[in-house]
Image (spheres, rainbow, N blue to C red):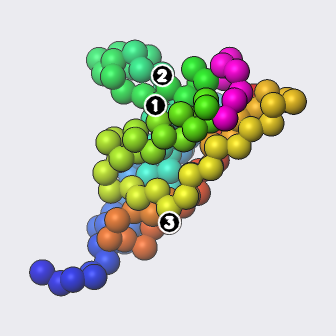
Amino acid sequence: MAFGATQQFPNDTLPSVGIGVNIPFNEGGVFTPNYTTAESIKSNLINYFLTNPGERPGNPTFGGGLRRFIFSAISEDNLDFLKEDVSQKIASQFPNVNVKKLDVLSNADNNEVTVQIYYEVVNTSIEGELVLNFT
């Protein structure tokens, strides 16, 4: 076993093989496939955090449930809880994703919360940024 070896996903070497679907769905009734593992992981994170638990039939525990914080009061305690909640959910649901930096920003005047996640995938060269805005 080589130490420090970088993993490459086989489907990333095949440019015509779809791995998942892009989120948000922009095409009229047609799913747009993504062709790289990096795009697929980002779409999976978006899907997870924008789904509320109980919303998906057959898998009632799936979902990060971030939308439930939209109507809660914006305070430092809530923002700290939200940051800790996102970190724990990524660690438990996406064990190969390592959070490099997590920011939860608020604009109380406009009742906006922004979650910025900077992440990397373990043993790969995949890094990404996910920004979720809630108004």
Name the residue: 50% across, 66% down: 127
* Residue 111 shown left or right of residue 14 in the figure: right
User: Residue beneath label 2, please?
Assistant: 52
Q: Give the residue at x 81% y 31%.
A: 108
Find out whether residue 111 is within the magenta segment.
no
Instruction: Report the span colored magenta.
Output: 70-76
* Horizontal side of residue 118 vs 110, given as left or right: left
Judging from the image, what secondary structure is the residue with disc 3 in?
Answer: strand
Judge whether 92 appears above or below 29 on screen. Answer: below
Residue 43 placed where, x, y %? Answer: 50, 45
- Separation of marks 1 and 3 at Cα, in angstroms: 21 Å
Q: Nearer the viewer, residue 124 or 31?
A: 124
Identify residue type, mark 1. Answer: Gly
Mark 1 Cα shell of 10 Å, populated few (<14), some (14-19), many (≥20): many
For marks 2 and 3, give the CA distance.
26 Å
Q: Where is mark 1, residue-wise?
A: 64
- Report the residue marked by disc 3: 127
Compare marks 1 and 3 and give the one earlier in the sequence: 1
Disc 2 or 1, which lies upstream in sequence?
A: 2
What crowding class fits label 2: few (fewer than 14 Cα within 10 Å), some (14-19), or many (20 or more)? some
Where, quadrant-wise, is the C terminus in this rendering?
top right
Q: Disc 1 on helix, strand or loop?
A: loop
- Kindly tell me whether residue 31 is visible in this rendering: no
